[in-house]
Each structure stands twice: as C-alpha cells, then as structure tokens.
Amino acid sequence: MKRVFIHTFGCQMNVNDTLRMSEALSSMQYSPTPTAENADLIILNTCSIREKAEDKMLSALGRYRQVKLQRGALIGVGGCVAQQEKNRILERVPYVDFVFGPDAIQKLPEIIGRVEADRVRVVETAWVDSESYVFPRADPNTSRGKATEFITVMKGCDNVCSFCVVPHTRGREVSRPFTEVLQEAASLTTVGVREVTLVGQNVNSYAGGISFAQLLLRTAQVPGIERVRFTTSHPQDLSDELIEAFRIEPKIMSHFHLPVQSGSNQVLERMRRHYTIAQYLGQLEKLRAARPDIAVTTDIIVGFPGETDDDFEKTYQLAEQVRYAGQFSFIYSPRPKTGAAMREEEWGSVAHDVKIARLERLNAMQKKISVEFNAKFVGATVEVLVEGSSKTDATRRFGRTSQNTTVNFDGDAPIGALVKVQIQSASAASMSGKQLSVDSLPAVMIPEAMVAPEVCVA
Ligand code: SAH
Ligand code: SF4
Ligand code: F3S
C-alpha cells in the first residue's frame, strides 16, 4: 500500500471533494495518512477565494518540498487555485508534478499513472460539459466513524457577484439528480451517519428534478436521517417554499447561513447581489416567523471598492439590528478576472488600515452578540448529536446544537447518539455542559473517528 496525504483548504465543497479524491486513489492502492512526512503522494486541495488562501497554499507547498526531496513523494495541486492558475503553477513551482481542476477528480488515477509511467508533468483542467457531468458517488465506507457528513447537491455558480472568483474556478451550475442525493443519504445511514449537510455554492437555485425545499424535505424522510442542514444560500433565490420547509419539518436544523455581504444598497449593487437590504430583512422576518429559534449567520466583506464610511456604518448597523448568531467577515481581496478587480481604480480602493479598522469593529461587536446569543442557553437543556471526543479535552464529548453551536460536555454517549445536554456556560464560539440523558442511539454503532484529513479554512 502507498500512502496519500491530502491537505484541504477552503469550503465544504473542497472537504467533500477530498473524500472523493481518496476514493479515486484507493483504486491505485493508496491509503490516506494523517501526516505529510510519511506520504508517497501529497495533494493540496486548494482555495482561491481570497489572496491569503493562495498564500497559504504556497507556504504549505514549501513545507512539502522537503518530503519530496527526502522520499521522492509526488506532489499534486487540485481545487480552485489549480483551475485558476493551470500550468502557471508548474512554471512557478518546479517541484509540483501535476495540476488538476475540480472536474478532473475522477481522472486522478489516470493522471498519476501518466506522471509515474512517463515521468511527465501533467495539467488537467478541462471542464466536463454540463450535460455529461456525472457527480462522483460517495463510498459510504469513507464516512465510517462519522455521525455527520456532507452531500454535494450541485456544483458551480451561475451568479456573477463582482468580487467572487468561484464562477471562474467551479464553472457553470450543474445540479445533481435528486434520486442520487437521496440514495447517497440512504447509503450513509448504513455506516451510522445521522445528519447530512447538503452543500453547493448556491443551493437555492438547485434544479435536480425537484425544488431545493422539496429536496430538503425528501432527505429528512430518508430512514435513519435525523438531522438535515445545508449551505450556502444566496438571498436572491430564497423562496417562500424553503421558508415553509422550516415550519413543517423539525428535522431541518435551526440554522440558516445567509450571506449579506454589505448593509449598503449602493455597495450591494456594485457587488451585483441583486437584492436590497429591505428585501433581505423581509426574508429574515419570514424565516424567524416560521422558525422562532433559528440561528442566522452571515458573511460580510469590508473594504469593497468604493465603500465609504457611511456604507460601512450601514453594514455595522444592519449586523447590530439582525443580531447574527455568527458572522464571517473578510477584508475585500481583489481576485483575477472579477468585475470588481477590473473596476477597482474607477470605484476607488479603500486604504488597508481603514479595512482593518472596519473589520475589527465588526468582529468586536459580533463577539459580544455571539456571547449573548449563546448565554441565553445557560441553564437550558439542548439536544446534541455526538460527533466524538472534544477537541480541547479528550475526556469530554462534543457535538452541535440544532443552531449549529459546538457543545463540549461531560458524558459518555457514543458517536451518533442524540443526547440531552444541560448547558452550564457559554462563550462566543461554543458552550459547555453535562449530559443528562441519551435520547437515541444510531442503528449502527459508529467506531471512534479516525484521524480526519488536515483541513485549513482559508
Ligand atoms: N456562494 C456563497 C459564497 C461563497 S464564498 C454566497 O453566495 O454567499 C464565501 C464568502 O467569501 C463570501 O460570502 C464572501 O463573503 C467571501 N468572499 C468571496 N470573495 C471574496 C473576496 N474577493 N474578498 C473577500 N471576501 C470574499
Ligand atoms: Fe460567488 Fe456570488 Fe456565486 Fe456565491 S453566489 S459563489 S459569492 S458568484
Ligand atoms: Fe470553495 Fe474556495 Fe473554491 S471557497 S469553491 S474552495 S475558491
């Protein structure tokens, strides 16, 4: 057996793609290893959403060069930077052996075969056309040891948000037929998975034979599936039908990630987001009426070209008014071939120190609100799906609430159990408590999770 180490950067799509890469490689007798040092093959599954993500990839590559020198390991670059930079990666980094885009995952054995046999460097970044694209089917054995798993329901993005590189790195939207999604959910239950998160860059425009709301409802009906989540939604396609699904299906968890990006309509227009703040707030109101305990989280970009103090104040006030349970805020980073990068001079760059100051203000406010949000649960009893031992203290357990907050707790329930936990304390990022009772055990006992592949959120 040879060993492969895959370093994953970026979003859940990449996390899931990494699993598909391991499966494709198992046909070549590669088994996953948790450390690069003993690997025969090192793959970086990259993200290019911000410049920093690319920098992280380059510094990781620098570290893995040693392994190549010592053991002759092959090094491959996949994911979004691969799709964006293609053969430029080979030109820039002489020790990279092959580059492959997100559509070439299933071709990995063939690519590596060519590299090994012919001692050539390979670049494979052609798109598979939408009609003939077949989504790789997950092998449930890859998910053994996990209570929760992702299911890819669509790929690509047909929007043209002016800051975003994803349409260039992931291509056109293709939805996975709903029957395949339901089959995958059912197959995951055979290894003990009880929660699934349906993932895509823009799940609200899912078109795999039924609406996205129907897909959620049907997934919730799969025997053995107790919890359903999804990400990411674009506010422009959020339908009343999806909001209604929250009212009628308790297995859909009380968490909605709805990236707003900015609180200023002028900025939203330049971002090409196609909604106004009034429309966004209207949707939130309906959502909260349908599911009063819902936790709403968001993404915000600060320092978008032309963002004035007044625009930023609007964002700050919006976040204060909405009281998000969590907020992922980023400094704007110009990306190749995007509308905003091309018009930055015309719209005007925001000074770096101004961007930092805005980000810090938002983060400080959000931290306070997140603490308050979680503090409301202190003393209450919540339901948690046990995912394993706590990352900070191996003698404790951890899982997540319906609202997606991490709970570390004293208890002994096995992975996959749904337990009642009494919350004793809370911080901005997590809560702590003690197990009161076990509500239900998984139909299949799940072995303690093996070491997961290294993931680095870029
Ligand atoms: N499909 C999702 C977004 C995926 S990218 C959606 O439409 O909401 C995740 C987040 O990265 C975005 O929501 C945005 O806040 C941030 N992001 C994307 N491009 C960026 C850029 N050029 N600079 C800074 N942040 C960016
Ligand atoms: Fe990027 Fe916009 Fe598509 Fe999200 S919806 S992936 S931000 S282009
Ligand atoms: Fe995901 Fe990053 Fe690509 S966020 S889609 S891995 S650019």
Image (cartoon, rainbow, N blue to C red):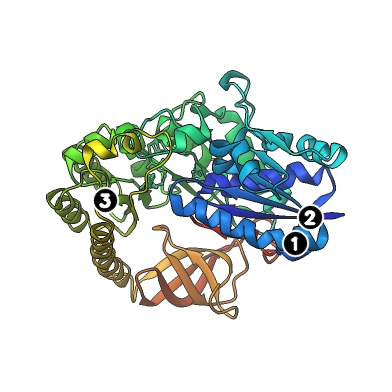
The residue that appears at 33% across and 49% down in the rendered structure is: 332
Residue 277, quarter of picture: top left
The label on residue 196 is none
Q: Position of residue 150 (x, y in %)?
A: 56, 47
Q: Nearer the viewer, residue 99 or 402?
A: 99
| Image position of 335 (left or right of 222) | left
Asked whether the beta carbons under mark 2 and mark 1 sit within 8 Å of each other, the answer is yes
The numbered dot on residue 73 is 2
Task: Give the image location of residue 180, x and y in percent.
Answer: 61, 32
Q: CA distance from mark 3 to mark 2?
A: 41 Å
The residue that label 1 is drawn on is 67
Locate residue 291 relative to residue 413 in the image: left or right.
left
Q: Which residue is mark 3?
A: 303
Lower position in the chain sequence, tag 1 or tag 3: 1
Find numbered disc 1 in the image and state the secondary structure of the residue it sits on.
helix
State the SS at label 2. loop
Crowd rating for badge 3 (residues with CA inside 10 Å; few <14, some 14–19, many 20+): many
Q: Residue at x 53, y 36 (%)?
A: 153
Q: Which circle's residue, 3 or 2, is located before the other in the chain?
A: 2
Q: How many numbered marks does the figure carry?
A: 3
- Which residue lies at the image location 24% right of the left edge and 50% below the top edge? 350
Q: Give above or below for 127 relative to 400.
A: above
Residue density around tag 1, few if under 14, some if 14–19, many if 20 or more, within 10 Å: many
Nearer-the-camera pick, 140 or 71: 71
| Residue 194 placement (x, y as % from top left) | 58, 53
Q: Amino acid under label 2?
A: Ala
Check the image and name the residue furthest to the top: 131
Q: CA distance from mark 1 to mark 3?
A: 39 Å
Residue at 51%, 23% (x, y): give it. 209
